[in-house]
Amino acid sequence: MLLHIPRVLDAAQLAHCQQQLATAGEAWVDGRVTAGTQGAAVKQNLQLAEQSPVAAALGDVVLAALERNSLFVSASLPHRVYPPMFNRYEGGMTFGAHIDNAVRLLPGSGGKIRTDLSATLFLSDPASYDGGELMIESAGGSQRIKLPAGDLLLYPASTLHRVTPVTRGTRLACFFWVQSMVRSEEQRSLLFDLDRAIQQLAADVPARVSLAGSYHNLLRMWIEV
């Protein structure tokens, strides 16, 4: 399931992130520092150093926004979220076709996260740069995605994807991974559809209560915490 989640960041949060990233200076490093063997061979971008204060502060902004976003929570059922990272593409930079690593080490903790879902939060006005589309391959073919600033795309981490070369301007984005409480993509999709249907039954109390009971009973069967 590919899910477009609009307005994860409001205008003030977005402006703050853009200003901080524009003045990050030497905090920008070669994006290959966090790439695996597969990714490093095709990755050409800049990345905010994970240990930089700017990355930590902006990551907190994103995490707080995600916690308040009911669509994100419903779709991902998050157990763990990798600390958000930030990248920059310009001057022909690109990221070739790859699949994200199945496991990531949580920085500074020694812990691990299983990457069930990948997320890209777009931070630049799409009219301010050319190229930079997120290309995702699925059973239905290739999808070319370029979202408004502040919007997020959530998609299975098992998906083959790439970023096309940025030929004008600068593309800024935040990216991270989610370990869901429900590992199965099919089960998560079913729970998401059921939750959306429940939200649309506000006026029909008996039906809402019945469906909510079914939702939570399925969650009990499938959840891993």
Image (spheres, helix red, strand yellow):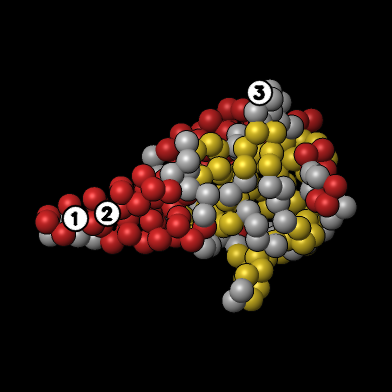
| Residue under the image location 67 percent in, 65 percent down | 135
**Disc 2 crowd, CA 10 A, few/some/many (<14, 14-19, 20+):** some
> Could you say where residue 5 lies in the image, as x and y percent from the top left?
46, 55
Q: Position of residue 219 (x, y in %)?
A: 37, 48
Position of residue 220 in the picture relative to residue 85 (left or right): left
Number of other residues with Cα within 10 Å of mark 3, as a class: few under 14, some 14 to 19, many 20 or more: few
Query: Secondary structure beneath disc 3?
Result: loop
Residue at the location (19% across, 60% down)?
Answer: 201
Measured in 3D between alpha carbons, the distance from the residue under mark 3 to the one under mark 2, in whole angstroms, is 37 Å
Position of residue 32 in the picture relative to residue 223 (left or right):
right
Residue that badge 1 annotates: 210
Question: How many numbered marks have been drawn onto this rendered protein structure?
Answer: 3
Q: Amino acid at mark 2?
A: Ser
* Secondary structure of residue under mark 1: helix
Location of residue 180 in the rendering, given as x and y in whole percent from the top left corner: 51, 45
Q: Nearer the viewer, residue 84 or 156?
A: 156
Image quadrant of residue 169? bottom right
User: What amino acid is labelled 3 in the image?
Assistant: Ser
Q: Is residue 123 left or right of residue 206?
A: right
Pinpoint residue 110: horizontal percent, then vertical percent: 69, 25
Q: Earlier in the sequence, mark 1 or mark 3?
A: 3
Q: What numbered label is drawn on residue 109?
A: 3
Residue bearing mark 2:
214
Q: Residue furthest front?
A: 221
Label 1 or label 3, whichever lies nearer to me, is: 1
